[in-house]
Every structure is written in structure tokens, then in C-alpha cells.
Image (cartoon, helix red, strand yellow):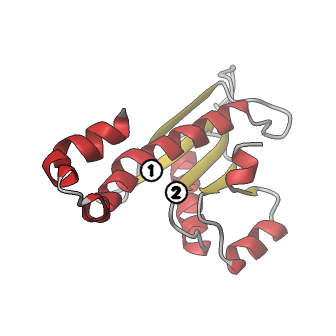
């Protein structure tokens, strides 16, 4: 239904002329960014909710903002997993970035490190926070090496998401 509403209905006259290839080539980037990307982020949040984060499950998972100290320093975060609230400082179990069609690299990891640090300054306990990178396209070698060296970096690919 979503495909019909996003792609077919607005281009029905062109599709009737047999120009399906043209319609798809023009609509594909919009469909990927407005339909597939948000759906992938939702699947990643569902994964984070069901994932065992070092012996603990998240009580709350959502997208959010890691507020920075000044204008333009806020970081949008696709997956924020929080531990259950107790009498202590609330723990940030994981902060994650989700990219459907982009090979992720160390730059994505650095962005998550900055988001984690900004959330720490806002009062969250980030001592054991896992930096999770979710990708439908894969990870470059430098990021794979960084994840192999640090157990607090989790690379989540499609087989892991759907296993």
C-alpha cells in the first residue's frame, strides 16, 4: 500500500503509457529516503528493544536528539536504548545510527561517540554505553577493525537484524 501511495498513484498516467522504468528511476531516491529508510530505523529500534545489552534489556527505545552546547550542535540519533529507571542516574544502554543504503565508516562511529558524550553531559550514565551501527549496505574495513578492538562497538548487519 505504501508503495502504491508513494510511487504509483502520483505517476499513474506515466505508468499507463508503459514508462515504469522512468517512473521508478525518478522516484527511487524519494522512496528510499521517505519509506525504506524510516522503516529500517524502526526495525533497528525493535532490535534494540529485544537485544540483551550486557545482561540487561532496554525499558525504552526511541529516536531522539543528543543536545549540544550551542546552535547547530544537536545530533539526531536513530536509536537510543535506555535502562529501566531506578533511584540512580538513568543508564544509556546504547546509542545507534541506522543507514539503509550507505556503507558505514569511522566517521559514523565518531558521530555516535560525540552523541554519547553529549548525552552524558545531560545526566545519563554512559560508562557502559554500546555504540551500535546498523547498516543495510555494510561497513568499511576501518570500522570493522575498530569494532574488533572495542567490545562497546556493535556492528549490526541484515543477517543479525533478521536472525
Given residues 52 and 119, the one toward you in this image is 52
- Whether residue 146 is situated above or below residue 35 in the rendered picture: below
Measured Cα–Cα span from mark 2 to mark 1: 6 Å
Residue shown at 66%/38% (left/top)? Answer: 48
Please tell me whether mark 2 sits on a helix, a strand or a loop. Answer: loop
Q: Is residue 138 left or right of residue 145?
A: left
- What is the number of the mark on residue 76? none
Image location (x, y in percent) of residue 81: 62, 37
Image location (x, y in percent) of residue 43: 58, 39
- What is the number of the mark on residue 37? 1
Image location (x, y in percent) of residue 153: 73, 59
Residue farthest to the front? 17
Residue shown at 36%/36% (left/top)? Answer: 2
Few, some or many residues within 10 Å of mark 1 (<14, 14–19, 20+): some
- What is the number of the mark on residue 100? 2
Q: Is residue 38 visible?
A: yes
Given residues 14 and 128, the one toward you in this image is 14
Residue shown at 52%/58% (left/top)? Answer: 99
Circles 2 and 1: CB atoms closer than 8 Å: yes
Q: Is residue 122 visible?
A: no
- Whether residue 38 is situated above or below residue 111 in the rendered picture: above
Residue shown at 13%/49% (left/top)? Answer: 13
Which quarter of the rendering shows the C terminus?
A: top right
Amino acid at each position: 500500500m505504501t508503495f502504491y501511495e508513494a510511487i504509483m498513484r502520483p505517476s499513474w498516467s506515466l505508468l499507463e503509457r508503459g514508462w515504469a522504468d522512468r517512473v521508478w528511476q525518478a522516484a527511487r531516491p524519494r522512496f528510499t529516503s521517505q519509506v525504506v529508510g524510516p522503516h529500517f530505523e524502526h526495525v533497528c529500534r525493535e532490535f534494540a528493544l529485544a537485544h540483551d545489552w550486557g545482561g540487561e534489556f532496554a525499558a525504552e527505545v526511541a529516536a531522539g536528539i543528543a543536545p549540544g552546547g550551542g546552535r547547530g550542535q544537536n545530533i539526531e540519533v536513530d536509536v537510543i536504548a535506555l535502562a529501566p529507571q531506578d533511584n540512580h542516574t538513568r543508564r544509556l544502554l546504547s546509542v545507534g545510527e541506522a543507514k539503509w543504503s550507505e556503507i558505514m565508516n569511522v566517521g559514523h562511529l565518531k558521530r555516535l561517540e560525540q552523541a554519547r558524550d553529549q548525552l552524558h553531559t545531560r545526566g545519563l550514565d554512559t560508562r557502559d554505553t554500546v555504540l551500535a551501527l546498523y547498516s543495510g549496505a555494510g561497513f568499511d574495513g576501518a570500522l570493522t577493525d575498530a569494532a574488533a578492538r572495542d567490545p562497546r562497538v556493535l556492528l549490526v548487519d541484515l543477517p543479525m537484524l533478521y536472525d
